[in-house]
Structures are given as C-alpha cells and as structure tokens.
Amino acid sequence: MRRFNLRAAGLAVAAAGLVVAAAGCAAENGGTGGDAWCGKKIGFFGALSGPNAAIVLPSRDGAKLALKQYNDANADCKLEMVEFDSQGDGAQATTFANTVVGDADFLGVIGGAFSGESEATMETYQAASVTMISPSATRLDLTSKGFSVFHRVVGHDGTQSAAIAKYLADNDAKKVFIVDDGSAYGAGLTAELVKKLGDIPFEQDKVQEQQTQFDATVAKAVAAAPDFVFYGGYPREAAPLFRQLVQAGVTAQLLGADGLYDPALAENTEGAAEGAIITCPCLPADEAAGTFAADFEAEYGAAAGSYGAEGFDAMNVFIDVITGGASTREAVLAGVNAYDADGASKHIKFDSKGDVDPSVVVIWSYKVEGDGLVPVAPLSVQ
C-alpha cells in the first residue's frame, strides 16, 4: 500500500539498477519481491529513553505505523526501521551516525528529534549523502548551515516564536520573564522570541542543562514580578524550575514551547505546571488528515502525542521516494528534494534549504490540565 503518490519527477534511476541484487533483497525479507530497495533500512534517532523521551516517542511511533502499513501490504519486499536511542545527546547521535553511514543498506534517517543532535550529525550524514528528515527539530538556523541532506517536516522557530509573541501581545502581557537552558533548541528559540517581542517589556536569565536548583533564577523572577514566565528548553529542567517558581510565590502564567510538550509535565511538577500554556508546531491528532488519528489509536491504544503525525509523514516521504525507484542514497536525496505531496500533518514540499512552506505550518496552543495536555486553539502569527 502506498500512503501518498510521489510527484517527484526526474528521479534518475536506471532500469537496470532496479534489478541488481533484487533476489538477495527479497530473500532477506523472506519474500519474492524483485525490487532493489527490498531489505533497505531507514534509521530513527532521538531520545527514546530518559527524562525528555515523551517528546520523541510519538514521532517514533508515527514512523513505525507508516512503515507497518507499507510492510503489511508489501510482505514480499519490506523496508526496515532501525532505532537509535541518542537520549538527545549529540555525542551519542554522532556515534550512531557513523554506524548508519558505514552500512550501505541505510538509505536515510528520520532525525534528529532535537536540534542539538541534528546539528551535531549533519556533517557526518552530508559526507555520505544520507538524507535526514526531522519530525521535530525546530531551531531556525539548522537549514542555513549549507548541509543539503537536512530536511524537516515541521515548522521552524521563526514561525513558533512569532506565534508566541502574538499570543503575549493578544493577552496584554505587561512584563515577561524569559529563561532558557542554553541548548541549541532552547537558546535558539528564545533568541527568536526576544526579536519579536516588540514593545513588551522583558527580563531574561539562563540556566544550564541538568541543573536542578534554580535559586538565583527564582529570585530574579520574584523581583521582576512578571505576569508571564516563558521557558525555552526541555522538561528535565522545566519541572524543578516550575516547582520552585510556584513555591516562591510566583503567580505568573507559565508559558513554554514544543520542547515542553510532555503529558507528564503536571505530574512531574507536582501540579505546579497546571494551567501552563505550551505551544507546538504539531497538530492535535484529530486535526491530522486522513485516517491517521484512528489508525494510530488502533495500533497503540492511545491518541498520538507531539509530532506523531510528523513522524508518520517523515517515514512516508522515504517510503514514497524509495518505492518510487530510489535504491541509492543519491537517488533518495534527489527524490526527497523533489517531493511534493499531501501528508497527514501538512502538504510536504521542501524548499532549497530543506524547510517546508511556512504557509502550511500551524502553531497550536495546549494547556497543561490534570494528567495531560489538551489542545486549546491554533495561534495566529500575523
């Protein structure tokens, strides 16, 4: 079964090349298919365990669902997804990248899930022409570093920061206290937000990844007396920070971006994050096109979380391109560059830098409520 139709004209794959080693590929899959892509691999790398895994697992599961749908309909010529648990660490992701590029059966990777690990591995994948498609790495400058292999099916932080700034203005923010964790993602998003605040007064502070005590930052927040506190980073640091802010008497509206899209945020903050607003360029599951939401829930027994539909789309781009005849890394890169089709999350077509069209990106707001996150509304970026 093909989820999408590939409209990538001009994939230069010679007919003779489609036959080479076909029998061996088919045998590897226990089938009788005669296509050169049988048995080829697609990697997935991101934080599959650890305190930030909840942000990544839905996109992993979305990718697995897309591949299962394809393999179930093509038992004689399957593809394989190999998972690499980087825990969001660039050094671990680089080790995995070397494993991928050293195995000629890998035709592409879905990832990185985070911006830092994406940046850390780009050069390795570029040297081997291994196409990257990230479902969730949003740092704006990832697509301006000159690496032609990097693509993402998600909107970047230029769009998300504009939506957050508009949200603050629309809610008559008098003063914003802004904190980031110094990571490639957190610092990048925060820098973009600061540029877009306009006349809204703000104060700013930085913390560090793996920090657990935030006395100095909390004292600054108390002194600033803001009506909004924005945090740019991941749940590992946000949870104790939010707890300590509330314990110190800070009553400001807590606000974060997609890095905090963790259904366990309320529990991990002992209720301190209740009512916090989280923005994300990811769709609520029931807003996705086609049967994605129902298929995901049927497969996993729960609704898709952050970037589930985007992970599904990333895998389907690879499936369409590879089963359209691209059985080499160079052909896959050409096919992804030329891809033009509807996905579950949005229409997928990459610009010359690897970004999707900003006009098809929708930023959603979610509220931390009870033991999870509930969608509120799409946010305007105008």
Image (cartoon, rainbow, N blue to C red):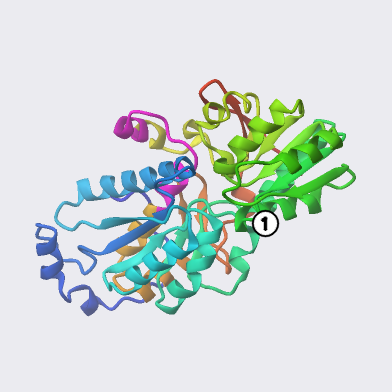
Q: Is residue 305 magenta?
A: yes
Task: Kindly indicate the quadrant of the structure image that contains residue 28.
Answer: bottom left
Instruction: For mark 1, give the secondary structure.
Output: helix
Nearer to us in this view, 124 or 61: 124
Q: Is residue 86 above or below residue 312?
A: below
Residue 341 spot, x, y in % from top left: 46, 54
Q: Quadrant of the C terminus?
A: top right
Residue 101 spot, x, y in % from top left: 35, 73
Task: Kindly indicate the quadrant of the structure image that contains residue 85.
Answer: bottom left
Nearer to us in this view, 248 or 372: 248
Segment tinted magenta in the rendering: 295-314
Residue 217 spot, x, y in % from top left: 74, 42
Q: Is residue 167 above or below residue 8?
A: above
Q: Is residue 187 visible?
A: yes
Q: Residue at x 54, y 73 (%)?
A: 147
Q: Residues within 10 Å of mark 1 (few under 14, many from 20)?
A: many
Q: Residue at x 77, y 34 (%)?
A: 228
Q: Is residue 364 visible?
A: no
Residue 138 spot, x, y in % from top left: 59, 54
Nearer to us in this view, 348 or 158: 158
Q: Amino acid at mark 1?
A: Gly
Q: Is residue 364 magenta?
A: no
Q: Which residue is mark 1?
A: 188
Per the picture, the main secondary structure of the magenta-coloured stretch is helix
Direction from residue 119 to residue 216 in the image, left or right: right
Direction from residue 297 to residue 260 in the image, left or right: right
Q: Is residue 79 above or below residue 303?
A: below
